[in-house]
Image (cartoon, grey):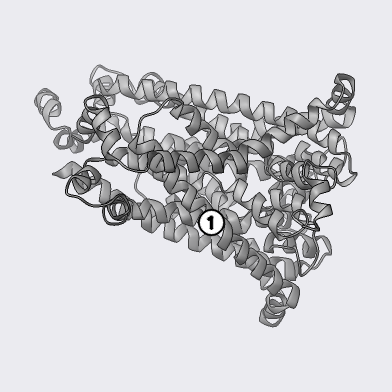
């Protein structure tokens, strides 16, 4: 059996696998034990906390839940969160497309340095991401005096919240698009250009359809982080109820006031957002897998 | 096929492409401008601010007793959480790649929950679970184990936050691992454990270390999920990012910035470590392909 399997395996590994599977499989009890440990870990750290959010949110019933999420301060927080994401995500989307076009389609010196710098915001603590804008726009900051003289508010107001959000979500779209566009090469674009299409037309009709799933993937992750960011926004927000509180900040205030039902009711909105994000993300991953496995089969 | 053509495109006719493809100056120019405005100039402000401090003032700010205690907690708890994630995350990755069981796809999708769930939500949920009357806390209480409002709570929150990193770095490496190597080891008389220790483990070691470093790096900067469960007692359960915020609230901008510089330097060091580990991991992968 094994003597026959070896020459077959050299040319077509897939055929040999089922017969050899038993030789490289673990005993049943080890498999059961490992699956048990993994499920216990995932349940304890992921499912139980998620269930706790909804349990606490509905603990005092639908009425309390509904009034908590329709209260004026809560609605103001939802509006501010949506508005912040609506500004931050498109900005980083445009940046992501520009950066991936430059990096994937051209060769230039310092490319790997540029890649490292793009990832930088991921390795900076959210608190520091907020701090940098305090140093720039705070009363003692670089532009503090000028801003005060011209009566422009950035810190402890919406522009600061948007800037901090843009900073922490900076790499999301770019880091999804760069490897995708690099793996696709430039042949299709070249063909379009040779046939006389303009640069913009080429991008719109050739590049964009090829990267649309990767683009959507990056946008969804970027949006989830933009709406959920806490640390960076907390530093620059000023925590004015109904004015500069995003949903996560409003959750914190309610929680610290021991208004747990309302805090968890608002938190459940964010948990729902996370679940929708995960569902969309998984769906797109399947589409991406289909899209990348097709050329290999040709 | 894909690799071959892109390589030809890269090495063979770079100048032709360069002339043909439009938008190089526009896209690169915009990229660098936006990167500078949003990331580089603001980050440089942290370093410029500390240059205005004397060395003595800087040293006093980053080495006071309270801040040293916060380093110990932050790095100790991050180390503990990253270790837990390597152990259990490794098992999760293994089980997801190698075995079939009901609900596997849901588990696979749920692994990314800590990336998608806002940290403040995770923080209050974990606190509710582990406090005295919580679902988990009321079992641990009689055993004399306190989690919420202790350093142990910080480890729990950081474990949650770092969970996806190890799983998602080990998973693709395990998928690419050649079954033939294991079959060869088995046919040469190696037991299953020996095959794991000598063949599989060395193959996934770089990925495990990368996952560890990523989880550790994320944990050291984490704020939102920790502050609710930690209790935030100075010297006991106060993490460094929170201490930075405390300094800011006291309008001690220089002190806050000095500590931020220490944290940033640690982050850059971790980034360097991670890049080195990933390069090693790639090299290992290529060697196995050959």
> A32 or A155: which is nearer to us?
A155
Q: Which residue is drawn at 24% across and 16% down?
A: B188
The relative height of residue A111 versus residue A31 in the rendered view (above or below) is: above
Task: Find residue B120 and report its horizontal and vertical position in percent.
Answer: 69, 55
Q: How many marks?
A: 1
Secondary structure of the residue carrying tag 1 is helix
The quarter of the picture where residue B240 lies is top right
Q: Name the residue under label 1.
A: A89
Q: Which residue is drawn at 31% across and 51% down?
A: A203
> B179 or A228: which is nearer to us?
A228
> Which quadrant: the N terminus of chain A?
top left
Task: Find residue A197 and report its horizontal and vertical position in percent.
Answer: 23, 52
Horizontal placement of A237 versus B57: left or right?
left
Horizontal placement of A35 versus B3: left or right?
right
> A191 or A72: which is nearer to us?
A191
The quarter of the picture where residue B56 lies is top right
Task: Find residue B92 and report its horizontal and vertical position in percent.
Answer: 47, 41
């Amino acid at each position: 059996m094994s003597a026959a399997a070896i020459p077959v395996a050299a040319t077509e590994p897939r055929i040999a696998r089922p017969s050899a599977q038993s030789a490289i499989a673990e005993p049943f009890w080890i498999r059961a034990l490992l699956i048990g440990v993994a499920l216990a870990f995932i349940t304890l750290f992921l499912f139980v906390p998620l269930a706790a959010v909804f349990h606490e949110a509905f603990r005092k019933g639908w009425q309390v839940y509904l009034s908590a999420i329709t209260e004026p301060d809560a609605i103001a927080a939802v509006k501010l969160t949506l508005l912040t994401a609506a500004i931050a995500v498109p900005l980083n989307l445009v940046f992501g497309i520009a950066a991936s076009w430059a990096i994937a389609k051209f060769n230039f010196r310092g490319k790997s340095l540029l890649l490292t710098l793009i990832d930088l915001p991921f390795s900076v603590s959210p608190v520091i991401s907020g701090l940098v804008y305090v140093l720039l726009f705070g009363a003692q900051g670089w532009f503090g005096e000028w801003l005060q003289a011209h009566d422009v508010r950035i810190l402890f107001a919406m522009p600061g919240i948007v800037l901090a959000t843009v900073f922490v979500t900076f790499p999301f779209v770019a880091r999804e698009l760069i490897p995708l566009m690099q793996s696709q090469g430039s042949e299709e674009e070249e063909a379009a250009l040779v046939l006389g299409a303009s640069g913009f037309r080429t991008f719109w009709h050739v590049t964009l359809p090829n990267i649309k799933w990767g683009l959507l993937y990056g946008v969804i992750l970027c949006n989830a982080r933009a709406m959920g960011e806490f640390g960076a926004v907390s530093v620059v927000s000023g925590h004015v109820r109904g004015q500069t509180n995003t949903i996560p900040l409003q959750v914190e205030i309610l929680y610290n006031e021991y208004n747990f039902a309302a805090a968890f009711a608002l938190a459940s909105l964010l948990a729902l957002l996370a679940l929708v994000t995960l569902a969309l993300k998984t769906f797109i991953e399947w589409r991406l897998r289909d899209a990348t496995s097709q050329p290999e089969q040709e | 096929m894909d690799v071959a053509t892109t390589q030809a495109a890269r090495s063979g006719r770079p100048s032709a492409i360069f002339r043909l493809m439009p938008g190089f100056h526009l896209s690169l120019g915009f990229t660098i401008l936006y990167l500078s405005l949003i990331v580089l100039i603001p980050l440089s402000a942290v370093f410029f601010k500390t240059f205005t401090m004397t060395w003595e003032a800087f040293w006093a700010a980053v080495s006071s007793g309270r801040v040293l205690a916060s380093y110990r907690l932050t790095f100790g708890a991050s180390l503990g959480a990253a270790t837990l994630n390597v152990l259990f995350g490794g098992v999760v990755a293994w089980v997801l790649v190698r075995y079939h069981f009901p609900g596997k796809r849901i588990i696979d999708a749920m692994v990314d929950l800590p990336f998608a769930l806002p940290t403040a939500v995770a923080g209050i949920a974990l606190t509710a679970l582990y406090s005295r009357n919580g679902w988990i806390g009321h079992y641990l209480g009689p055993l004399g184990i306190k989690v919420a409002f202790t350093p142990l709570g910080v480890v729990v929150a950081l474990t949650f936050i770092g969970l996806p990193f190890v799983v998602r770095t080990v998973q693709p490496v395990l998928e690419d691992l050649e079954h033939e190597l294991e079959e060869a080891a088995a046919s040469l008389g190696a037991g299953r454990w020996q095959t794991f220790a000598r063949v599989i483990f060395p193959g996934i070691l770089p990925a495990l270390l990368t996952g560890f470093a990523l989880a550790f790096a994320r944990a050291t900067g984490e704020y939102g999920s920790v502050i609710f469960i930690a209790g935030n007692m100075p010297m006991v359960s106060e993490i460094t990012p929170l201490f930075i915020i405390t300094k800011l609230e006291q309008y001690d901008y220089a002190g806050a910035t000095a500590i931020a510089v220490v944290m940033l330097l640690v982050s850059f060091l971790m980034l360097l470590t991670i890049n080195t580990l990933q390069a090693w991991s790639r090299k290992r992968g290529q060697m196995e392909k050959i």
